[in-house]
Amino acid sequence: MNKKSLTPFFFVGPHLILFIVFILLPTIYGIYASFTQWNLINDPVWVGLANYKTILFNTESTFYSQFMNGLKNTLIFVVLSVPVLIIIPLMIAVSLEHKKVKMKNVIQSILYIPGLISISAAALIWSLIFNKQLGITNNIFGSETVWAANQPYAWLIIIVITIWGGVGGNMIIYRASISGVSKDLYESAEMDGAGPVRRFSSITLPSIRFPLIYTFVMTTAGAFNVFGQPLMMTDGGPRQSTTVLMMYIRQLAFGHGESIAGMASAMAVLLGLVILVISALQYYVMNRNAS
Amino acid sequence: MKKKMGVSLILVWLAVAVLGGCGNGDKNTITFWTPLTGDDGAYMDQLVKDYNATNPEYKVKHVITSDMYTKISTVLNSGKGVPDLSIIHADRVPSFVKQGVLEPMTTVMQAQPELKEDNYLPQAWATGNVEGTQYTVPLDIHSNAMYYNKNLLKKYNVESFLDDDVVTIDEILSLQGKLDEGDYVVNDALLGWVVLAQIQNLGGGIEQDGKPAVNTEAMKQALTEIKKISDAGLMTPFGEDGYLMFQAGNVLFSTDGTWSSTAHASVEGLDFGVTNIYSTSADTFTNRASSHLFSMLKNEKRTDEKEQAIGQFLEFIREHSIEWAKAGQIVASKQVIESPDYDSYIQSFFTSNDKEIESLYIYTYEYYPYVAEAVDTYAGDIVRGNVDIDETLVTMQKFVEDKIAEGNSGAK
C-alpha cells in the first residue's frame, strides 16, 4: 500500500525536481531579492519596500521613468501583437480545413518552421530584409525609410517578425481542435442553409472555446515577456520608444558595471503581477462569456 | 511495478548526475575563463594550445564563457567552480577590487620577475593597480581606431588630412557640399567612445571628487562639436549601418575598433589604413581604449603551486602573444610590440611612438561603466538633434547618480 502511494511521485518526480530547482526556488529567491539591494556578489541588504516605492512613486528617479516607459512599450507590443497572433492563425487554421485545399501538412509545416528558428538568427535575416541599402523593402518597393530608426516603422518590423515567428504555434493548436469538431454538425448546418460565416461563428468558435482561451492567455503572457525582437531589431530605439520592460530589467541586473539586481527583481516581480492579473481577468471574462 | 520504479530511479539518478557534472576539473589543470566569444577566442585557443604543447606541469583549460560576468557572480556566490584564471575588462577592476573578489597578483609576480610594470604598456599595467596593489596582468589594449578609405581620400583630394596624424572636426567640416551623393565623411560606429575621447581632448573628465560628472561643459562641448558633423550632413544617416557603409566604400572614415581590422581586411577591394580618432583640436588626440586583463578571482582552493603555474602561463603569454596581434589587438607586452614581426600588423600604428601610446586612454573611474552606458544610450540622439541637449544631459547625470546610489548601499 505504502509502495503504491509512492509510485506516482516517481512519475512526476523528474518534472517536480526540475520545476523546484529551475522555477520555484528561483522565483522565491527573485521575490526575496526584490526586497533587497544587491549587486549579485556581496550579500543582499534588506531594504523592505524601498525598491517598489522608488519604481512606483518616485517620479524623479531614473528607475521610475524606466519602469513606466518599459511598461508602456510592453503594453503597446501586447496590444499590437496579441490580436493578430490569435486572428491570423485562426483564419489559417479554418481555411486549411476547406476541402479544396491541398498539401495541408506542407503548408502547416512551412508556417510552423519559423517558430523553430532562433530569434537572433531570424532578426538578422529580417534586419537585412529591411536594411536601407541592401534590403528588399527599399530596393524593390522603393521605401526611403530607415525602418529601425523611425516610428511607427520600428514597431512595424518588430510586429512583422513576431507574427512570422509566432503564427505557427497557435495555428497547430487551432487545427488540432477544429479537427476534433464533429463533421456531422457542419453537414447538418449546411443542410439547414447555414453559410460559411454562420458555420464558423456558430459551430467552430464555440467548439474550440477552451483552446481559444488557452492560446489567448498564453499568447498574452508571452507577449508581456517580449525581449528578443526589440533587442535585435531596434535595440530599443528610436529614443527608447521600443525599449520594453524586460530590456530594462536585464540591463539593470546584467548590464554594464555593478549589478542592480534588487531593483531589477522588483521590476520583474511587478511585471509578473501585471501578467498574473491580466491573465486571470482574461480567463474570467472569456470563460464567463462562453458559458 | 519494480521494473518501472527502477526506470524512474535511473532517470532521477541521471538527472542528478547530469546536474552534478558542472563541477571543476582535476587539480593539475588551470581553469581559464574568457569572455572571448568571437574570432578572438580562436586566437586565445591557439595560444593556450601552444602553451600546453610545452608540457607544463599544470595544463591550461580555456573555457570561452558567454555572459561571463553573470556566471562569475554566480560562482562567487556559491564558492564552487570559481575559475583559477580569468580575463576581465579594465572597467571591471575598480568595482571587483571594492567588492573584494580579486586576488592580488603578488605571488605570481614574485614567482615570475619579468611580470612587471616595465615590460608592459604603462596604462594597461596601471589599470590593474589599485592603491599600490597589483591585481591584474594585462594581455592587450583594444582601442577605438579610425580607419580611412585610401581611394576616397584620394578622390576628394584630402590625403593631407593625415599629415599630422590628427584629423580635426574642422577638416571634416571643410568637405561640406563637396561629396557625391551617397558618400559620407564619417560613420557613427562606436559613437559613445568617440564622445569619451573628445572629453579628454577638451581637457574634461567624467568624475569630480569621486562623484560622476556627466552634465559638464566638456561633455556638452564634445557633443556639440560632433553634432556639427551630423548637422552638415557628413555623418552616415541615423539608424543606418555606417560600419557596412564604410566597408561598401561610401565612407571616408570609420570610427570603430582595433579588432575590426581583420573584418575590413576581408572585404575585397577595400583599401584602408588606420589613424587616430578625429579630434576637436589639431594639438591633441585621444583614442578611448579598454584592456583585457588576466586576473584571479578569490578562491581559497587555489594552491600556491597553482598560482606559480599561472605565473608560468602568464610569462609564456608575455613572450609569445604575437599570436594575439592577429586578432587585431594592441598587445600589452613590450617584448612583443618591440619585435620586428609586430610591425606588419596594422595596429602597430598605435604603439609607433610615445605620443601614440599616450593617446590610448583607459578610463579608470569606479563608476565608468554607468557613465559609458549613459553616453551610449543618449549620445546618438543628441548628436542627431533628436533631443534637447541640456535636458538630456540632466537626465544622463541623474541616470548615473541613481545607479550609483543603488550600487553603493548594496555593497558591504
Image: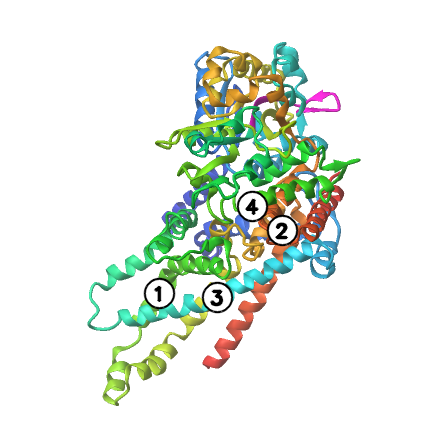
Q: Nearer the viewer, residue B107 or B158?
A: B158
Percent x, y of residue A112: 33, 58
Residue at x-position 52% and y-position 46%: B233
**Display coloring:** rainbow
The 10 Å Cα crowd at callout 1, few under 14, some 14 to 19, many 20 or more, is many
User: Outermost residue toward the right?
Assistant: B209
| Residue kind at label 3, given as amino acid type | Leu
* The magenta segment: B128-142
Label 2 or label 1, whichever lies nearer to me, is 1
What's the distance in space between the residues labelled 2 and 3, CA to CA?
29 Å
| Residue kind at label 4, given as amino acid type | Ser
Q: Splitting the image into 4 quarters, where does residue A113 fall?
A: bottom left
Q: Which residue is mark 4?
A: B230
Q: Which residue is mark 1?
A: A171
Q: Is residue B309 visible?
A: no
In the rendered structure, the residue with mark 1 lies on which chain?
A
**In the drawing, what numbered circle is on residue A30?**
2
Left or right of B163 on screen, residue B101:
right
**In the drawing, what numbered circle is on residue A80?**
3
